[in-house]
Amino acid sequence: MTAFDLGRKVFVAGHRGLVGSAVVRALHAQGARPPIVKGRNELDLADQAAVDDFFSNERPDYVFLCAAHVGGIQANASFPAEFIRNNLAIQTNVIHSAWKHGVSKLLFLGSSCIYPKFAAQPIREDALLTGALEATNEAYAIAKIAGLAMCQAYRRQYGFDAIVPMPTNLYGPGDNYDADGSHVVAGLIRRFVSAVQTGDREVVVWGTGTPLREFLYVDDLADALIHLMHHYESDEPINVGTGQELSIDELARRIAAACGFTGTVTFDASRPDGTPRKRLDTSKLDAMGWRARTDLDTGLRRTVAAYRQLLE
Ligand code: GDP
């Protein structure tokens, strides 16, 4: 097992995003040496030559590859070309140059949407590639599957220590609150907070409200990722989740409560529901002694507070 040494050079790719910013916070909290981070204007991860120069000059020891082109159900369904192109480019460049320039260990962030739409629940890691994908995010999922396959190939052929955690749906401070591009938690926080401010008595939730989802607070994910950097070394992906799911209807009510909204919640069934259910089987991670610590209501309260601060 390659030891993960917090005193050595870590590169966090995607440090301004939801996950990357949480990884930077967690590394800091654990007393790690400040990681190398690069803004998009300094280093375009889709530019192969620039990425290779960066690795050749900086020579990081470890990489958290959290940079990705991400978005909610609407953005994925509307812009599949950008989702597949940007993600393939970013991950191919970073994984290849990291290996080429001697990185000891790389973590490539996967996603639970890589699993088949109708996978048996809870979803085990070996459900991968056993059935058709959910159509709304197929382009993104295929890019992530290609990234996993690349990590596996580099491990097999070159002995490169690349690991691929598969997180469930994430939320927390630092999320993208774009009206059309966001995921469900950020999208609903934005709408409920706005309704409270303007005195609107009705908030519309997309879809039927019946899909089931599992939500992991992003600081818990960051903690899990560091745990995996220390203790996991395998070409098999590993799920990261809470094992608890709830309907979008119930989620909307919890978010309404966290925002202090007391009006009516209605559903717009003309919007897509996406996959009906995707609860992860986390037995592998459980066996490693890791558990999520933040319950949903606590996580939502913190996220709403962080969002309100952004508005100030
Ligand atoms: P998914 O897990 O890949 O489908 O990601 P999302 O977070 O985008 O959507 C999760 C579920 O929440 C889907 O069933 C959506 O239709 C539903 N949903 C309800 N309201 C919203 C919203 O305002 N934004 C988003 N993104 N999804 C919403």
Image: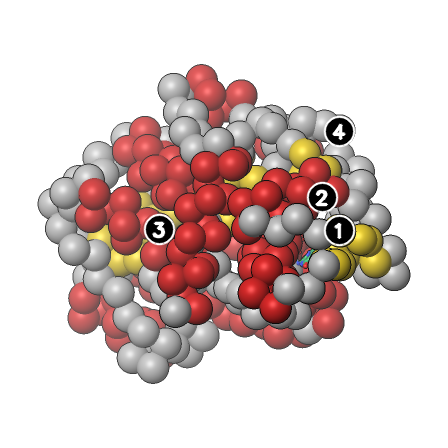
Which marked residue is nearer to the observer: mark 2 or mark 1? Answer: 1
Tell me where residue 61 appears, x and y as whole percent.
21, 52
Q: CA distance from mark 2 to mark 1?
A: 11 Å
Depth order, front residue of 293/167: 293
Q: Secondary structure at mark 2?
A: helix
Q: Find out if the beta carbon at label 2 lies less than 8 Å from the nearest ligand 1 atom.
A: yes
Quick one: label 2 or label 1, which is nearer the N terminus? Answer: 2
Quick one: label 3 or label 4, which is nearer the N terminus? Answer: 3
Mark 3, residue position: 22
Which marked residue is nearer to the observer: mark 1 or mark 3? Answer: 1
Q: Find out if the beta carbon at label 1 lies less than 8 Å from the nearest ligand 1 atom.
A: no
- Ligand 1 quadrant in view: bottom right
Q: CA distance from mark 1 to mark 3?
A: 31 Å
Kind of residue at badge 3: Ala
Kind of residue at badge 4: Ala
Query: Mark 4: few, some, or many residues within 10 Å (few <14, many ≥20)?
Result: some
Mark 4, residue position: 120
Tell me where residue 245 appears, x and y as whole percent.
65, 32
Mark 1, residue position: 265
Depth order, front residue of 233/261: 261
Coloured how?
secondary structure
Q: Residue at 43% across / 68% down in the picture?
A: 311
Mark 2, residue position: 248
